[in-house]
Image (cartoon, rainbow, N blue to C red):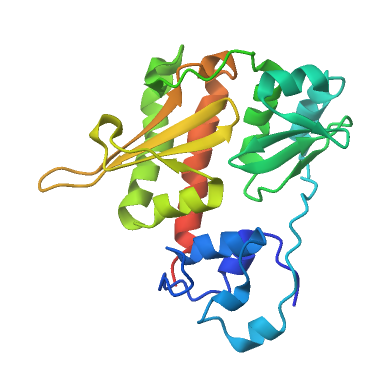
């Protein structure tokens, strides 16, 4: 059997019942831990015997991300960057000649030739925000105060579109996929936070080391629709521009939508 190269490769082999017999809340969380090497497939009591007998170890080494023609300029902007300074500004580190930054809890790296490598496999939309972050992040710390996209400089003008492309689609995903926030925590090292603005569920995502995102969800009530809001740290505009923040919000919504769609048995 071909070695799995993504979490979804492993997840596709499971029955998606979320039975909990493995000790995890969801099948997707279990697949994530198997891919990370923290659990064994054998812990799933419902996995067919033939898949257990023919399984091979996961290959979790960061693969090279293929660049499209439109990304060539992106690569050229990175070449010649002072990696030591960039590591200090971004909260990253230098390893084997590569600048490595944690994105959603996974290693995302770039070498001095401008080639990208990543442990994250749903990745194309992250390249431009990552580049913006690497090139522009300041040494300003995370403040710990959350603000709406509309409260970010230049955000008010684009907020209706941000609602349409990011918050509303993600609200619909949360409505139909109750396990969403559990899987966000398991897959992307999210952290639940209790009681933010009286939300029923709030999760902080470590998108970049100095650019966390908070997602708050309110369950529907009688006569009232559900609601979902995406917030950024008040320091966000010190590290990336409004376009990068818009792309992050829309990209996260799209990514979680794909995860929810693949979750169906």
Task: Please state if 166 lies on the left or on the right of 212 as rendered.
Answer: left
The percent position of residue 18, horizontal first and vertical second, equals: 42, 69
* Vertical arrangement, residue 132 with respect to residue 106, above or below: above
- Find residue 23 and report its horizontal and vertical position in percent: 46, 68
Q: Residue extending furthest left?
A: 223
Does residue 114 appear left or right of residue 139 in this picture? Answer: right
Q: Is 219 situated above or below 78?
A: below
Q: Position of residue 47 (x, y in %)?
A: 55, 81
Residue 124 rendering spot, x and y as whole percentages:
66, 42
Q: Which residue is nearer to you in this view: 34 or 81?
A: 34
Does the image show residue 145?
yes
Number of numbered labels in the structure image: 0
Residue displayed at 38% across by 57% down? 179
Report whether 218 appears left or right of 27. left
The answer to which quarter of the image holds residue 32 is bottom right
Relative height, residue 125 to residue 22 (above, below)? above
Quadrant containing the C terminus in the rendered view: bottom left
Q: Which of 77 and 8 is in front in this view?
A: 8
> Could you tell me which quadrant the N terminus lies in?
bottom right
- The outermost residue toward the bottom is 49
In front of the other: 97 or 249: 97
Residue 132 can be seen, yes or no:
no
Q: Quadrant of residue 170?
A: top left
Residue under the image location 84 percent in, 31 percent down = 114
Q: Residue at x 75, y 69 (%)?
A: 57
Q: Quadrant of residue 101?
A: top right
């Amino acid at each position: 059997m071909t070695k799995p190269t993504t979490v979804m490769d492993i997840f596709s082999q499971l029955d998606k019942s979320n039975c909990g017999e493995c000790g995890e809340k969801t099948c997707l969380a279990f697949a994530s831990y198997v891919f990370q090497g923290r659990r064994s497939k054998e812990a799933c009591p419902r996995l067919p015997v033939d898949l257990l007998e023919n399984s091979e170890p996961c290959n979790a080494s960061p693969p090279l991300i293929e660049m499209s023609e439109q990304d060539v300029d992106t690569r050229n902007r990175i070449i010649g960057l002072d990696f030591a300074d960039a590591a200090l500004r971004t909260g990253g580190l230098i390893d084997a000649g590569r600048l490595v930054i944690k994105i959603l809890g996974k290693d995302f790296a770039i070498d001095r030739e401008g080639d990208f490598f990543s442990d994250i496999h749903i990745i194309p939309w992250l390249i431009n925000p990552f580049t913006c972050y690497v090139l522009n992040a300041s040494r300003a710390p995370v403040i710990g105060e959350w603000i709406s996209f509309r409260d970010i400089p230049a955000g008010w003008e684009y907020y209706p579109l941000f609602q349409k492309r990011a918050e509303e689609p993600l609200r619909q995903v949360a409505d139909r996929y109750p396990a969403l926030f559990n899987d966000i925590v398991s897959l992307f090292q999210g952290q639940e936070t209790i009681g933010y603005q009286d939300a029923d569920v709030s999760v902080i995502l470590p998108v970049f080391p100095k650019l966390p995102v908070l997602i708050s969800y309110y369950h529907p009530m009688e006569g009232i629709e559900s609601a979902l809001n995406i917030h950024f740290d008040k320091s966000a505009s010190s590290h990336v521009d409004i376009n990068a923040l818009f792309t992050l919000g829309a990209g996260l919504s799209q990514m979680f939508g794909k995860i929810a769609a693949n979750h169906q048995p």
